[in-house]
Image (tube, rainbow, N blue to C red):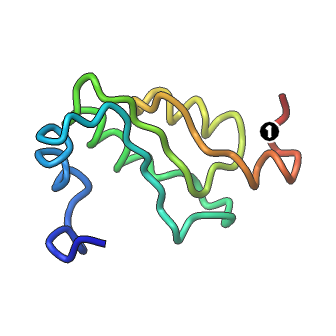
Amino acid sequence: PDPALDGRDPTAAAGLAHDLGVSEVLVIDLARVGSGSGPPLDAVAELAAALSGVAIYAGGGVRDDDDLRALEAAGAAGALVATALHEGRITL
């Protein structure tokens, strides 16, 4: 991890992402992975607002379809749902 961004707000990397021409960002709260505690909605919303035109994908803590809808409302283009899918809480 970049020590300059450690412990900072999720949007601290927005300028760097724009400078690099990033078109997609993956937001994962590692503490939430497999926890079923809910996805990082605030971080997704902040980044979606700060990175207009950049697809934001989220992971960590996704529990069910309601979380997927909440992520979509927050501006996410998609989500990682490995644990929820594996445990049958989200089905295709």
Q: Considering only vertical position in the picture, is 52 above or below 33?
A: above
Q: Is residue 41 left or right of residue 69?
A: left
- Across and down, in percent, residue 15 comes to 11, 45
Residue designated by label 1: 90
Binning the other alpha carbons within 10 Å of mark 1 as few (below 14), some (14 to 19) or many (20 upward) gives some
Q: Can you name the residue that lies furthest to the bottom here?
A: 3
Question: Which quadrant does the N terminus fall into?
Answer: bottom left
> Residue drawn 32% across and 31% down?
23
Q: Is residue 7 left or right of residue 81?
A: left
- Across and down, in percent, residue 5 comes to 19, 68
> Residue drawn 80% across and 45% down?
85
> Residue drawn 47% across and 62% down?
29
Q: Is residue 87 left or right of residue 38?
A: right
Q: Can you name the residue that lies furthest to the front here?
A: 20
* Foreground pick, 12 / 68: 12
Instruction: Count the labels in the image.
Output: 1
Classify mark 1: helix, strand or loop.
Answer: loop
* Foreground pick, 52 / 69: 52
> Residue drawn 52% across and 34% down?
70
Q: Considering only vertical position in the picture, is 16 above or below 7?
A: above
The amino acid type, in three-letter code, at marker 1 is Ile
- Across and down, in percent, residue 12 comes to 16, 55
- Across and down, in percent, residue 28 comes to 48, 56
Question: Which quadrant does the C terminus fall into?
Answer: top right
Task: Locate residue 76: give its quadrant.
Answer: top left
Q: Can you name the residue that lies furthest to the top here?
A: 53
